[in-house]
């Protein structure tokens, strides 16, 4: 938690909600790390507008009849992402902390945080969106 507060909270906020002091100045805005699932609105935005600075293209110019996963997606390998699954598995988070996310404001931390500190941040991040017994 201390490593997160010192190195991540400035962008992602003290509780990981993406509302750190630097957040208003960043494009894209820092991720809300407490979101455990992608919402329909988020998916629609990503699909419609793409993600500038990433490999995700905008699909808004396609005819509606060409959109959707349909029968053609059954043969894809690897399978398309299941957006109902929880995001941020340990390996993914470790990679993001180590390498950053190119084209975004998320920098690599491999030269700043030790392996032990990065592991501690990942462990803390996972507590932000793990379901509680009440959920």
Image: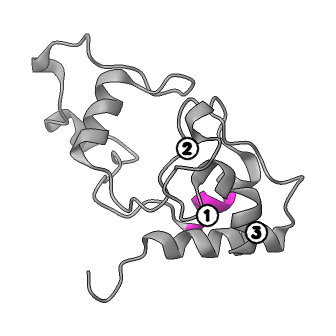
Asked if 38 appears above or below 55 in the picture, the reply is below
**Where does the image place residue 29, in percent across and percent down from the top left?**
53, 37
Q: Which mark is residue 91?
A: 1
- Badge 3 vs badge 2, beta-carbon distance below 8 Å: no
What segment carries the magenta color? 90-95
Residue at image point 22% right, 13% down: 62
**Number of other residues with Cα within 10 Å of mark 3, as a class: few under 14, some 14 to 19, many 20 or more:** some
Calculate the distance from the C-alpha at mark 1 to the C-alpha at mark 2: 20 Å
Sequence-wise, which precedes: disc 3 or disc 2? 3
Residue furthest to the front: 21
The image quadrant that residue 76 belongs to is top left
Q: Which mark is residue 30?
A: 2
Q: Is residue 102 left or right of residue 55?
A: right
| Secondary structure character of the magenta stretch overall | helix
Q: On screen, 82 above or below 91? A: above
What residue sits 83% from the left and 68% below the top?
115
Answer whether residue 54 is visible to the viewer in this image: yes
* Distance between mark 3 and mark 1 Cα atoms: 18 Å
Marks 1, 2: nearer the viewer: 2
Q: Going 48% across and 56% down the picture, which residue do you hit?
A: 17
The x, y position of residue 10, in whole percent, is: 68, 51
Q: Position of residue 2 (x, y in %)?
A: 74, 73
The circle on residue 3 is 3
Picture coordinates of residue 38, whole percent (x, y):
32, 51
Which type of secondary structure does the marked residue at label 1 adopt? Answer: helix
Provide the secondary structure element on which disc 2 rests.
loop
Sequence-earlier tag: 3 or 1:
3
Residue 92 painted magenta: yes
């Amino acid at each position: 938690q201390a490593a997160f507060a010192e190195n991540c909270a400035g962008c992602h906020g003290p509780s990981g909600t993406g509302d750190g002091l630097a957040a208003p100045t960043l494009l894209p805005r820092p991720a809300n790390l407490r979101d455990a699932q992608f919402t329909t609105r988020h998916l629609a935005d990503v699909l419609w507008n793409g993600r500038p600075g990433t490999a995700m293209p905008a699909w808004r110019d396609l005819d509606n009849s060409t959109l959707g996963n349909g029968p053609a997606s059954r043969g894809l390998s690897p399978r398309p992402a299941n957006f109902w699954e929880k995001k941020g598995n340990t390996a993914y988070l470790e990679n993001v902390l180590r390498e950053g996310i190119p084209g975004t404001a998320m920098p690599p931390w491999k030269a700043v945080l030790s392996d032990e500190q990065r592991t501690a941040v990942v462990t803390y991040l996972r507590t932000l969106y793990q379901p509680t017994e009440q959920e």
